[in-house]
Image (cartoon, rainbow, N blue to C red):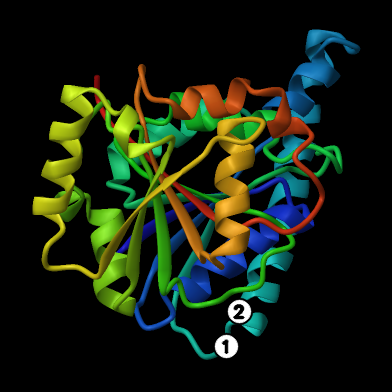
């Protein structure tokens, strides 16, 4: 049984992520763990009250989280009545990033799914600070980032962005392969820049990708850079009607540059597709 972890702050953004993943794997029975961390609330409360009252505050937060969790499970069961997923809710005063990594390691989580922004996310921010932090700290498990505005569509066209400085055997990257095989998806390998500008190493990696993906329906694209890499990718996604964007993340990956670029926080308020981030050990 596939195990999915969905962090939540009980916002509409978080619910969109939960609903999306129930639809994405609707033909399977999933074990979906809904995780709520109220660590930030604990920090705020304990800074204003004496230690003697902090335990009562934590108990109150636990109770509130349990009530919100019950309502959430009731709602998702109603909204996804045709699937047979199993839901459980975990509440913790520990930090979200630490708890996620512990659960991934201990429970063998297959996928973490988050909303692109939380309850307090600004309207003009594409990816919220919490989601960015989880992207940078998650170990050993892919992360699916789901924007609130997205409507579920079968991911028949999956874009994979690469700068060709590294080669990753996509045929062995299970998060991508599972979706491609399940939905008979087309893979679109996208590079921001001209093919003639690739150096020897990049050319070699391009050929390795071509050889690795012969059994899949694959197209390769070289697109001129606009204002930034992220702006260019989003334009490609919109123009070519992609359903999912996949990226590999490691210490030297250009994904870090995407989050550093100012355009990420100003890229616009229109809908963007889910992003699958696959962490690779350095």
Say which residue label 2 marks.
77
Q: Nearer the viewer, residue 119 or 252?
A: 252
Q: Residue at x 85, y 37 (%)?
A: 122
Residue extending farthest bottom? 82
Q: Nearer the viewer, residue 226 or 214?
A: 226
The picture places residue 192, in percent across and down from the top left corner, at 45, 37
Q: Position of residue 207 (x, y in %)?
A: 13, 43
Please say if 258 is above or below 217: above
Residue at image point 34% right, 25% down:
250
The answer to which image quadrant residue 106 occupies is top left
Q: Nearer the viewer, residue 57 or 181?
A: 181
Q: Secondary structure at mark 1?
A: loop
Kindly identify the residue that appears in the image at 28 percent across and 33 percent down. 164
- Residue 188 quadrant: bottom left
On the picture, is 138 further left or further right than 89?
Answer: left
Q: Is residue 144 rendered to the left or right of residue 278? A: right
Proximity of marks 1 and 2: CB atoms separated by less than 8 Å? yes
Residue carrying label 1? 81
Within-10-Å neighbours for mark 1: few <14, some 14–19, many 20+: few
27 up-or-down from 195: above or below:
below
Give me the C-alpha separation between circle 1 and circle 2: 5 Å
């Amino acid at each position: 049984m596939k195990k999915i972890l969905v962090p939540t702050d009980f916002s509409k953004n978080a619910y969109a992520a939960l609903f999306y993943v129930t639809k994405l794997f609707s033909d399977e029975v999933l074990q979906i763990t809904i995780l709520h961390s109220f660590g930030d609330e604990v920090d705020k409360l304990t800074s204003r009250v004496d230690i003697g009252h902090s335990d009562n505050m934590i108990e109150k937060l636990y109770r509130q989280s349990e009530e919100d969790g019950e309502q959430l499970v009731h709602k998702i069961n109603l909204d996804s009545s045709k699937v047979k997923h199993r839901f459980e809710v975990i509440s913790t005063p520990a930090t979200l990033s630490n708890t996620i990594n512990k659960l991934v390691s201990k429970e063998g989580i297959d996928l973490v799914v988050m909303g692109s922004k939380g309850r307090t996310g600004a309207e003009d921010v594409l990816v919220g600070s919490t989601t960015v932090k989880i992207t940078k700290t998650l170990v050993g498990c892919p992360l699916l980032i789901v924007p609130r505005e997205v409507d579920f569509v079968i991911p028949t066209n999956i874009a994979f962005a690469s700068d060709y400085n590294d080669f990753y055997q996509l045929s062995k990257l299970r998060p991508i392969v599972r979706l491609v095989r399940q939905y008979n998806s087309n893979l679109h390998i996208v590079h921001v820049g001209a093919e003639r500008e690739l150096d020897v190493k990049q050319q070699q990696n391009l050929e390795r990708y071509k050889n690795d993906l012969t059994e899949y329906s694959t197209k390769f694209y070289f697109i001129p850079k606009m204002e930034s890499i992220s702006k260019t990718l989003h334009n490609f996604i919109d123009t070519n009607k992609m359903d999912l964007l996949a990226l590999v993340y490691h210490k030297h990956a250009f994904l870090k540059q995407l989050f550093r670029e100012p355009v990420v926080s100003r890229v616009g308020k229109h809908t963007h597709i889910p992003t699958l981030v696959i962490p690779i050990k350095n």
